[in-house]
Image (cartoon, rainbow, N blue to C red):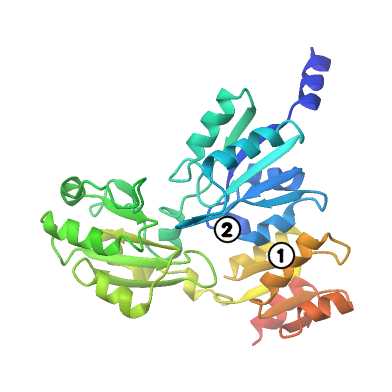
Amino acid sequence: MMATVRRILMTSGKVYLVGAGLGRLGNLSLAAYDCLQKADIIFYDRLINQNLLQVAPSSCLLVNVGKKPGNHSHSQEEITQQLIQASQEYQVIVRLKSGDPYLFGRGGEEAMALSEAGVDFAVIPGITSAIAGLAYAGIPATYRDKSSSLHIYTGQSRAGRTDLDYQAIAKSQGTRVFLMAVKALGDIVKGLIGAGLDEKTPMAAIEWAGRAQERYLVSDLGHMLDDCQAAQIKAPALFVLGEVVIDQQKLDFFSQAPLFGHQIAVSVQTPLTDCLALEDLGADLIFYPDPAAESSRQELAKTALKQADIMISQELLNPWQENLAAETLHFHGSVDDFIHHFSKQ
């Protein structure tokens, strides 16, 4: 029987719909990390932290199927067809999505298409920004005596306009989170006030949640639109409405971390424990590949390293790496050495 199972596994590929959460390495589940490490081909979205792709084997094919609002380089039908086709050519196919595949990520549609085509698939959940994004900004999704429920809405619809029941949202007593709603913010504010929701209801905006670029502002429903325009809040951003916003400053741990705001470049060969130690101190990681890596990996590194402000390496940089890190502060030593040195600053 085991021989039969092994033969089936060798003759048909399996598609994994993987949630990458906020994009931090430490937010990946063990199953998601394992999938990336054994992937033969990865189809990834626009908002994915592309540094995670460096975790995949050097032989892994990387396919960008990202869709910008109003400019879909790949239609949803084309993407699902690519997944089906890949299952006939590769063993481990990863469809990498930000957040969770089944929460406004069209993962359900892709899974249905795979099921109807007879393709073996599995879903690996990710931590949605509607929970993790709030946490990194110091906002709990629920809080006793303040909010006993969580409601998540999308600011997008098939017709390109908001399609929300503002009366129902206004009457709900819990935490209300709006994803993909930057363009729809004006409609949302107007709709909720029109439905009778108090303009003084606490509200917060979080941009690039959980990343080095994270910004947030705390306001109220009546002032949120003007405040966001003044602060030039842009996508990707989310909005949270409710009493849980009030104590945000007391619970904000992330922006207080010593390496918050720093983007640190490390070798993709850096031990996982060292990577997590840097993230625990608030840093964003940027992986640079081996010089022998294929051109697609090098291009990813070139783009990412332009944003790095510190590069850590134990080995002397070769000319290729020196060129990539020309405008980056270089620390020669181990991650432990760097943390020890940094702690003395």
Look at 17% across and 51% down and name the residue there: 170
Q: Position of residue 56 (x, y in %)?
A: 75, 51
Would you identify the image quadrant in which residue 322 lies? bottom right
Count the numbered circles shown.
2
Look at 89% across and 77% down and name the residue there: 318
Q: Position of residue 219 (x, y in %)?
A: 26, 71
State the mark number for residue 122: none
Q: Is residue 156 left or right of residue 260?
A: left
Q: Considering depth in this image, is 123 or 111 the residue closer to the camera? A: 111
Amino acid carrying mark 1 in the image:
Leu
Question: Can the viewer see residue 143 in this picture?
Answer: no
Q: Which residue position is annotated with label 2? A: 23
Q: Is residue 304 left or right of residue 5?
A: left
**Circle 1 sits in a helix, a strand or a loop, which is it?**
helix
Look at 83% across and 16% down and name the residue there: 3
**What's the distance in space between the residues labelled 2 and 1, CA to CA?**
15 Å
Q: Is residue 155 left or right of residue 194?
A: right
* The C terminus sits in image quarter: bottom right
**Circle 2 sits in a helix, a strand or a loop, which is it?**
loop
* The N terminus sits in image quarter: top right
Q: Position of residue 317 (x, y in %)?
A: 86, 78
Amino acid carrying mark 2 in the image:
Gly
Identify the mark nearer the N-term, 2 or 1.
2
Tell me whether circle 2 and circle 1 mark residues in contact (CB < 8 Å). no
Q: Considering depth in this image, is 52 or 249 the residue closer to the camera? A: 52
Q: Is residue 186 above or below residue 195?
A: below
Q: Is residue 56 left or right of residue 234?
A: right
Question: Can the viewer see residue 259 in this picture?
Answer: yes
Q: Which residue position is annotated with label 1? A: 300
